[in-house]
Amino acid sequence: MTLPPIESLLAQGVAAAQQGEHAEARRLLEQVVEADPAVVDAWWWLGEVVDDDRERVVCLENVLTLNPEHAQARAKLQELHAILPAESPSGIDPVDPSLEDPDQCVYCGQPANADDERCPHCRGRLTTHERPARRHTPALIAMLLVVAMLATWSGVEAFGAMLRLSRNATPPTTVQTLVDTGLLNPSVFDPASLLNNPLMQAAFGDVLSLDYALAGRLFMAGNVRAALLFLLVLALYVRWTPGYYGAMAAILTGLVWDLFQILSRYTGWLAGLVGILLGLLALLLLFRAEDNFALRAVRMQVQLHAAAEGATGAYYWGRQYAREGKHALAAHHFRHAVGRAPHHPEYYKHLAISYAQIGRFGHSLRALEQARKLNPDDDDIQQLQALVREKLRQAQVREAKRQASPGQM
């Protein structure tokens, strides 16, 4: 059976690496990662055959990005970090304190105050909302269980009304035939016989005396309440904030409803009491789990994401922020990616694009020049350089007009 091209190249590259033919192994493995950058084994073996330690760091970081549980790659990367301190991108970035200002606008990179809710320049919103609790707390898990029990119990309470409805119902033809032939005891389907014990009477009361239409409405109300509570369990599980207040309203309404049913003798005291106790417990746990749903305003800052590990992690989050239009925050992450992997031309390209988006055209051109040196065959770099130069020219024209306008200082 013929192996697919990538698998064949990988097998040949690994074999060459094991035989000490590093140049051939590198040539083959680089073809693999070019065709599919998600092949973990290709990055691992490429890290084994490259000559430069910083290139080896890039390979190992790619391994960990694709497989964070790769213990060998993590151990080797720690060894390399100990002997190779991270480089800063100062070679392409002249001293510019504004780039390191955490309070700058995450969108346009212009100066902003720490307490600004909107950027004074681009009017972008600088605050976001986060939950104090990042994971499901024990109180939330307990509340979910109790609300699910309460939903189930609502269905149990509706069982009494169903018995009243079944009293007037005609049994199925097959059941009636078995009764007529003496093969089935008719008392099995007799609601009166089912309620003829103290426990069932305490649970459902004298439901057989209820009006038939009223029993139908009670049965419908019990099932609707059960369905609503199960939907609220799902809303609470995903920590949907409106679901929190909806659950509070549903539980309070349910407490009043259970008390009304007991006083009106629509249900037995035992069933109503169990419903009230479950509702009170659910309400208590709901208050204890408030941190799972409360949202607090947080001022966004230009700082490295906590999960941005290594060059590939910083590059990944840079791409994420660039898609959200947070170009200053993206540039911050791309700068870290460049500092940790200074021989990766793709990092410089994205850094240059983010710089251009926030008006740092000189920085952008320097990053593109570095990318061109690393990959002179990339035609996109020349197109980006031409585009950035045109943007720089337009910005210079606008600044000249502003300074030449009367009344401008």
Image (cartoon, helix red, strand yellow):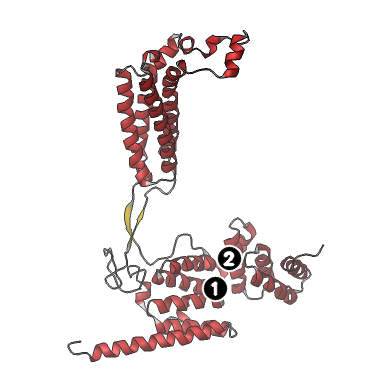
Q: SS class of the residue under badge 1?
A: loop
> Considering the image in quadrants, where does the C terminus appear?
bottom left
Q: What's the residue at 35%, 42% (across, down)?
A: 244
Q: Residues within 10 Å of mark 1 (few under 14, many from 20)?
A: many
Q: Is residue 402 left or right of residue 340?
A: left
Viewer-closest of 274 and 295: 274
Residue 53 visible within the image: yes
Where is residue 229 drawn, in percent x and y? 41, 35
In the rendered structure, which amino acid carries the disc numbered 1? Ala
The mark found on residue 61 in the picture is 2
Q: Kindly indicate the quadrant of the structure image that contains residue 152.
A: top left
Instruction: Classify 271 as above or below 32.
Output: above
Q: In the rendered structure, which disc, 1 or 2, sits on the residue that comes first in sequence?
A: 2
Q: What's the residue at 66%, 76% (across, down)?
A: 51
Q: Is residue 342 left or right of residue 159?
A: right
Viewer-closest of 243 and 7: 243
The mark found on residue 341 in the picture is 1
Q: Are marks 1 and 2 in contact (CB under 8 Å)?
A: yes
Q: Residues within 10 Å of mark 2 (few under 14, many from 20)?
A: many
